[in-house]
Amino acid sequence: MGGVGVGHLPVIAMIGLQFYYAILAILTRAALLDGLSPPIFVVYRQGIATLALTPIFFSSKRRQSLKSSLRFRSYSLMFATSLIGVTANQNTYFQGLYYASSTAATAMSNLIPALTFVIAAIFGFEKVDLRSLRFMAKILGTVCCVVGALTMALLKGHKLLNTEFIPFIHLTASRGDDWLLGCSLLLASSVFWSSWIIMQVPISSSCPDHLLSTFCMCFFATIQSALFALFYGENFQAWMLHSPLEISCCLYGGIGIAVSFFIQSWCISISGPLYCAMFNPLSTVLTAFIAATFLQEELYIGSLVGAVGVITGLYIVLWGKAKEFEEIKQEVLQSNMQGDEISSQVDLEEPLLLPEKSEHVDKSKMEP
């Protein structure tokens, strides 16, 4: 009797992670419509995530690493990264989720690979080669993603899936200016998250322990988000969680950060980042189906067409990145083979030199 093979575990893990993202989008929007403030939710989510990651310091090695290896530069990088990639990202994301819809929020997240490519090309991290097919594929995929995002924001069209189910929660889609504002905030959130991905390069070099850097960024983001919520003008009542929905949403979102980080890190270490990114559109499909069918969230033709455009652009960008990885791998193999050939030629061309002692036999050893 064969169980689930080890090779299937990353697939199961990534599918489960997409279910988590879909439920998070739906549950959070329901809580926001129920009265939960987006800035307050970000504070609680980051605080719970920080507490969930605290057990990593049970390891004496990690405590020593925190004291000895991290310098001012490392803390400065993590503070700036948490400000852009966590505090700004999550505040714009959940505010956009409130104004738009859960389906639009998960669809917009598929822009991240394309936006990461654009930002990396602007700052010189991405090699620009207009004669390369893989580079042109990434440009085409980026254009498809942007057009799809604009279609979602500007063109709504007729309503789809007008079901007769009695919903547990009615997730009414925003209209007019609120919808456009929500999509704009979600787009800004994707830009912030793409910047966070690029900023992981210097952070990884200054702090190779990813769990430790994640804890520090969650800790900094908790303080930053709390200050933002205070300046945002939230009163004391807004900090109170008034319903089981709001409490469960904060717990689910906070603990889920630690769990999702572990799953993504593990899957990336086994199958690579492209493999993990391929599963992202699944959360969009799951969110649209659950929200529209059971919760009566309004789904429009423009949203559907735009989501298809974003997902199509995502896979075109991923194809270009896959070709890039193949070329890099071939170059590494060719350089290794050339190095082996050169070393072999050097070995063959060198004369066979015998030690001087071998020319003179020790007579004492020949005597009986």
Image (cartoon, grey):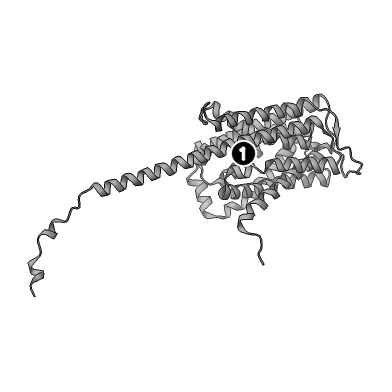
Q: How many numbered circles are shown? A: 1
Which residue: 31% across, 48% down? 344
For label 1, the crowd category at 10 Å Cα-Cα, with few meaning under 14, some 14 to 19 and many 20 or more, is: many
Q: Quadrant of residue 280?
A: top right
Q: Quadrant of the N terminus?
A: bottom right
Q: Quadrant of residue 100?
A: top right
- Image coordinates of residue 314 in percent, x first then y, are 65, 35
* Residue matched to label 1: 220
- Image coordinates of residue 214 in percent, x first then y, are 59, 44
Q: Is residue 185 above or below residue 56?
A: above
The reply, left or right, for residue 284 in relation to residue 168 is left
The reply, left or right, for residue 311 in relation to residue 244 is left
- Image coordinates of residue 117 in percent, x first then y, are 58, 31
Q: Residue furthest bottom?
A: 368
Q: Is residue 271 above or below residue 4?
A: above
Which residue: 84% across, 44% down? 243
Q: Amino acid at mark 1?
A: Phe
Q: Quadrant of residue 116?
A: top right
Q: Quadrant of the C terminus?
A: bottom left
Q: Is residue 285 among what the camera can see?
A: yes
Which residue: 87% across, 42% down? 169
Which residue: 73% across, 34% down? 308
Q: Is residue 91 among what the camera can see?
A: no
Choose between 283 and 30: the one closer to the eye. Answer: 283
- In what element is the residue under mark 1? helix
Choose between 160 and 64: the one closer to the eye. Answer: 160
Choose between 281 and 47: the one closer to the eye. Answer: 281
